[in-house]
């Protein structure tokens, strides 16, 4: 039995501004195991991004709590990947992927070697000196992932990171990135509105209710795969059943 790395208990959060109050989360509870790949789906505007902002510590819970169980009892390092890769056009790819290390004064020879290896492993070896605009959308997203992994986070928060990619690129890049995250043994929370992506990439899918979000249903995903290819996950015999069950849960929410 793997240990929990994150536990969210009875979490509530509302936004307050001049026009009033927007309740985003209400009594939300779930746990994430170390090394797990969790996908979260839910109606648009239900509070998904708010959950990640709370986990990242960018917002503070109004009620309830978030508990972390990192290595040696420390708060785990958290990496955040968004829909837009936020690569800086005035820095080359090397300068982009090492930006976090540079800011934190951690650009040691060892860390340089680690980042060089990632560029090589993830097919960007010859692109270190290129500008972001010279890369394809998929390569840019891989560069953004390397920049995130460079800081060695234990938990990766992925907020619809593939939404800006065209469909075909998205299929391969999402599978690539999930494979890299799994190989690195990281814990990941992926927010997506693409149910097939959720089913094919994750170990478990949480379905959220309409705003204010709470957990409506939970589906542990077990696919029989002919090989380890995440692309083949969409051909697994169980795939359609999971897809339809999740679709049904979501449709009830959207009515
Ligand atoms: P999702 O990511 O599921 O689409 P969000 O977590 O971004 O949803 O937002 C949840 C709700 O909170 C939405 O109704 C949104 O309009 C509202 N909201 C998000 N950010 C703010 C903010 N800074 N101020 C006021 N309301 C906000
Ligand atoms: Mg969002």
Image (spheres, rainbow, N blue to C red):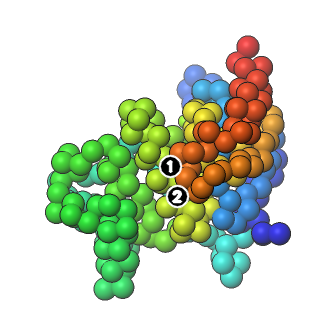
Disc 2: which residue: 179
Q: Which residue lies furthest to the front in this view?
A: 226
Image point 67% across, 42% down: which residue? 236
**249 relative to 90 in the view: left or right:** right
- Please state the horizontal and vertical placement of residue 118, each as a whole percent of the image: 37, 69
In this picture, is 250 found above or below 150?
above
Secondary structure state at the residue bearing disc 1 = helix
- Please state the horizontal and vertical placement of residue 164, each as a whole percent of the image: 40, 35
The answer to whether the residues at label 1 and label 2 have Cβ atoms under 8 Å apart is yes
Query: Tag 1: Cα neighbours inside 10 Å, few (<14), some, or many (≥20)?
Result: many
Q: In which quarter of the image is residue 146?
A: bottom left
- Please state the horizontal and vertical placement of residue 109, each as a whole percent of the image: 31, 86
Q: Distance between the residues labelled 1 and 2?
A: 6 Å
Can residue 234 be seen by looking at this rendering? Answer: yes
**161 relative to 24 in the view: left or right:** left
- Please state the horizontal and vertical placement of residue 242, each as a whole percent of the image: 74, 35
Secondary structure state at the residue bearing disc 2 = helix
Disc 1: which residue: 175
Image point 60% across, 55% down: which residue? 227
Ligand 2: quadrant of the figure: top right
Q: In which quarter of the image is residue 239?
A: top right
In this picture, is 23 found above or below 117?
above
Q: Which residue lies furthest to the top in this view?
A: 255
**227 relative to 239 in the view: left or right:** left
**230 relative to 9 in the view: left or right:** left
């Amino acid at each position: 039995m793997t240990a929990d790395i994150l536990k969210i208990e009875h979490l509530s959060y509302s936004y307050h501004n001049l026009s009033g109050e927007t309740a985003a989360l209400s009594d939300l509870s779930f746990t994430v195991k170390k090394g797990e790949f969790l996908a979260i789906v839910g109606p648009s505007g239900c509070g998904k991004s708010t959950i990640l902002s709370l986990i990242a510590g960018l917002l503070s819970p109004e009620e309830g709590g978030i508990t972390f169980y990192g290595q040696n009892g420390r708060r785990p390092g958290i990496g955040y990947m968004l829909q837009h890769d936020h690569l800086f056009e005035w820095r080359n790819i090397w300068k982009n992927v090492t930006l976090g290390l540079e800011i934190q004064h951690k650009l040691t020879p060892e860390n340089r070697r680690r980042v060089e290896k990632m560029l090589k492993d993830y097919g960007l070896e010859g692109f270190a000196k290129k500008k972001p605009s010279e890369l394809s959308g998929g390569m840019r997203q891989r560069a953004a992932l390397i920049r995130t992994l460079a800081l060695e986070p234990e938990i990766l928060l992925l907020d619809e990171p593939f939404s800006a990619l065209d469909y075909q690129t998205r299929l391969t890049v999402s599978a690539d990135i999930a494979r890299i995250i799994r190989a690195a043994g990281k814990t990941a929370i992926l927010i997506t509105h693409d149910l097939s992506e959720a089913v094919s990439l994750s170990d478990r899918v949480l379905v959220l209710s309409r705003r204010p979000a709470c957990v409506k249903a939970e589906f542990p995903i077990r696919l029989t795969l002919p090989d380890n290819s995440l692309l083949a996950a969409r051909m697994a015999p169980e795939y359609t059943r999971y897809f339809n069950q999740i679709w049904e849960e979501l449709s009830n929410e959207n009515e």
